[in-house]
């Protein structure tokens, strides 16, 4: 499967006016799921790599509400790198996609929306195990 067919770049509307910018993200409307969990990553420098896992049940939308970061997505056959650098841009990631977030700018705040509550058992944190589960061919 082509990795570009799995993730989706979302562009959120700007509802601001002369007073400033306003972006609204509503579950099951602006993103393809109901939001059950919200977390954000900040204070990571350009050398830190976050994520480094895939999820069996969780879908995510990643939004850099401040600054920028990069996300490497990998489906076991190919990978793609997406730069998140606008607060109106979201990256939708379905289940069973390996993700690495890295190259955080000093002012980066990476907001993550998820369709599930946290369950550590649904995380795949070993790349070789991920490759086996998806029947992939990539090796690191």
Image (cartoon, rainbow, N blue to C red):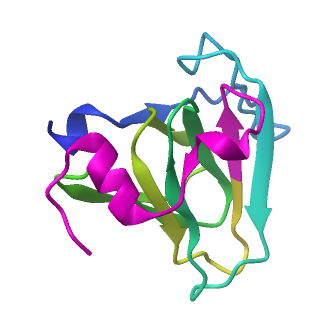
Question: Which of 120/30 is in front?
Answer: 120
Q: Give the range drawn in magenta.
A: 111-140
Picture layout, residue 86 above or below residue 9: below
Residue at (79% x, 47% y) in the render: 39
- Where residue 90 sits: x, y (%)? 53, 40
- Magenta stretch encompasses residue 25: no
Q: How many labels does the image show?
A: 0
Residue at (48% x, 64% y) in the render: 100
- Where residue 25 sits: x, y (%)? 69, 25
Residue at (54% x, 67% y) in the render: 69
- Magenta stretch encompasses residue 119: yes
Residue at (46% x, 56% y) in the render: 99
- Where residue 74 sits: x, y (%)? 31, 54
- Furthest residue toward top: 29
Would residue 74 be visible to someone looking at this image?
Answer: no
Find residue 5 and report its image quarter. Answer: top left
Find residue 59 and report its image quarter. Answer: top right
Would residue 70 be visible to someone looking at this image?
Answer: yes
Picture layout, residue 89 above or below residue 74: above
| Rendered-image quadrant of the N terminus | top left
């Amino acid at each position: 499967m082509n990795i570009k067919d799995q993730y989706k770049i979302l562009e959120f509307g700007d509802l601001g006016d002369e007073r400033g910018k306003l972006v609204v993200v509503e579950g099951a409307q602006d993103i393809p799921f109901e939001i059950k969990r919200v977390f954000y990553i900040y204070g990571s420098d350009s050398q830190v790599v976050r994520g480094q896992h895939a999820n069996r049940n969780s879908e995510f939308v990643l939004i850099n509400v401040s600054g920028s970061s990069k996300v490497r997505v990998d489906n076991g056959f190919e990978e793609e790198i997406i730069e998140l650098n606008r607060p109106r841009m979201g990256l939708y990631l379905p289940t069973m996609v390996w993700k690495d977030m890295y190259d955080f700018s000093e002012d980066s705040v990476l907001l993550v929306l998820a369709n599930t509550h946290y369950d550590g058992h649904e995380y795949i944190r070993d790349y070789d195990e991920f490759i086996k589960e998806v029947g992939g061919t990539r090796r690191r």
